Amino acid sequence: MLEVRNIVVEFDAGRGRRVHAVSDVSFHMTQGETLGLVGESGCGKSSIARAVMQLPRPTSGRVVFLGEDLTRVGKARLRRLRPGFQMIFQDSISALNPRRKVGETIAAPLRVPGKTPHTERIQKAREMMSAVGLEPALFDHRPFQLSGGQCQRIQIARALMTGPKLLICDEPVSSLDVSVRAQILNLLERLRTRHALTMLFISHDMAVVKNVCDRVGVMYLGKLCEEAPTEALFRSPAHPYSAVLISAVQMPGNAMDFPKTRAGGVDLPTPIDPPSGCRFHTRCPYARPLCSELEPALRNIALHRQVACHFPLS
Amino acid sequence: MTLMAADSETPALQVKNLTVSLHTPRGTVRAVNDVSFAVERGKTLGIVGESGCGKTILCRTLIGLLPDCAVVGGESRVAFNGKGLLRLPDPDLNKIRGMKIAMVFQDPLSSLNPVMTIGRQIAEALVYHLGMKWKDADFQAIELLRSVGIPSPERRARQYPHQLSGGMRQRVAIAIALSCKPKLLIADEPTTALDVTVQEAVLDLLVLNQTERKMAIILVTHDLGIAASRAHEIAVMYAGRLVERISAQQLFDHVRMPYTRALVDALPKMNQPPHTPLRSIDGQPPDLAGEIGGCAFAPRCDRAEERCLSSIPPLQPTGDPHHLFACWNPIPESRP
């Protein structure tokens, strides 16, 4: 369905320096599965989402979607393919055009392929609004009149209008209240089943990821450090950083089968000048001399489980 | 108001019948409505609720930082170490806030002064409240930075807030708050803007300082998980009122008020498999600009009866004196 091969995303950091937001990340997604990407801010999660969307194109590497390499196809062809992969952004208020009415925003994606007449577009937008739980009366409202949860529903409706196969969700619930968050997560789950969606779900919230994803990739400073089926990852993380993230979930009775792990240091090192060897060695509680010298490659440790660590936890 | 002797038995903070109204162009909004609670010395009270429930206005009332449009109700009483706070003139209040009562805000970038080095900002509190000399205060500021876990504090003290990461800025805000060894710390969503690993470190830091100094903490958060794992007692707010007060250990299994139950059930749980449906609460919180005759949660509550819509349930205990809830038709007590 989607294959991401060795993508690198770099940004200019001024004074001739480059930020390596994503360094050589590969993963694949099969039809109907939900892959989660987790990590702290600045680890490159959102950059991956945007690289898959070609917003902008990654510096190097390939993004193969349904057999076509999106990084190589021409502009016109990309435009034709875009209805197949859509994205929901974190900050729903700024992701919506403040001057457009809700209904226009939702109907807008149908203008791009250019075959749907106006009345049909409006009709479809109304149907989609009720499918995502927006009252018909909101059709003529504008985003500033609505709550965060409603704006997130508009984004979901807009993304689904073109009938995508792949939906990329970048922190779709992180700015929402607990009860609204549950509504949106349930809605996404319902729509995922109904439309047979494949989802790339990006979040920093481990509990949400546990609820939503079939498989999880853990990222640190632009690199994938572990990839595993959700239940296996939460039961027995192999990378110390995964263990740190799961341990940091603030929840009483968060019974873990592995010892609580804490990261050292106050801050993430800068991605402009990442640490040598394993990028996590400066904060890793289990680091040994080898870790600062040699960068561990992502390797299989069990079926469907990969980890980039010289001394994985067992 | 009655002045109580500030002995070790008096709770650090007592709030009685606190009502705060905001005069807005849309009408008068009852942001905080008849709220009463106490915080014991050395204990943490977690105040949880969703946005707009009145948590922040409540905190700001306690520290005297209300917007001009806010009016505190005549019945309201707030006593700190037995001393009334609400009608204190500003010069007297200034001797208490920042010194005896300190606050940590959600966004450290906007609560810190952008054009003053962080060392000076910490020293300022020491000079102002403790009458230290600048030279001594500057030195003490470095020690405080060290104590909140900032590496190379001598160098950091000369930097400005924009040169620090979010986690470090929040540590600086905590260092300022702790500089005068306050008896009460009000932390309004102190970790909401931070990464999970940093969040844990910041919460650990607060707890560590609490045990060292017998400091009382009010921890305001929208995250039930944080409240349950870091607070001793939890107060749940909905539409400006306290609806349940419960010890943190009992939160997940023994809640009686349907709103609290719904909040707990809406949380994704770490012990459930992927794709487990979450419980969501239908509808929206009520508009606080109007009068609410009954329980504010009744229109969204599946246990609501006729009485819930017509009369306001009081916050009261049944059986366990430490467990209070405001509900006419509470969830039956679970048997152990």
Image: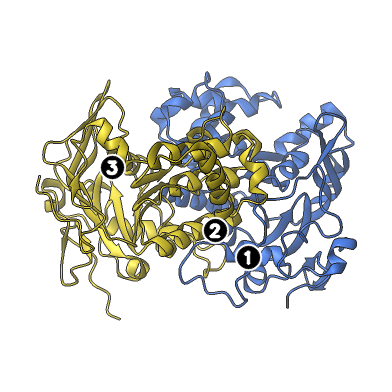
User: What type is the residue that disc 3 sits on?
Assistant: Leu
Q: Disc 2 marks which residue?
A: B200
Q: Disc 1 marks which residue?
A: A262
Give the camera-side residue of A216 and B60.
Answer: B60
Give the SS element for disc 1: loop
Q: Chain of mark 3?
A: B
Look at 21% across and 62% down and name the residue there: B324
How many C-alpha atoms fall within 10 Å of the one at disc 2: few (<14), some, or many (≥20)?
some
x then y, percent, for residue B174: 48, 48
Q: Is residue B248 left or right of residue A156?
A: left
Q: Disc 3 marks which residue?
A: B62
Tell me the colour chain A is drawn in.
blue
Q: Chain of mark 2?
A: B
Q: Is residue B312 left or right of residue A228?
A: left
Look at 18% across and 68% down and name the residue there: B321
Closer to the N terminus: mark 3 or mark 2? 3
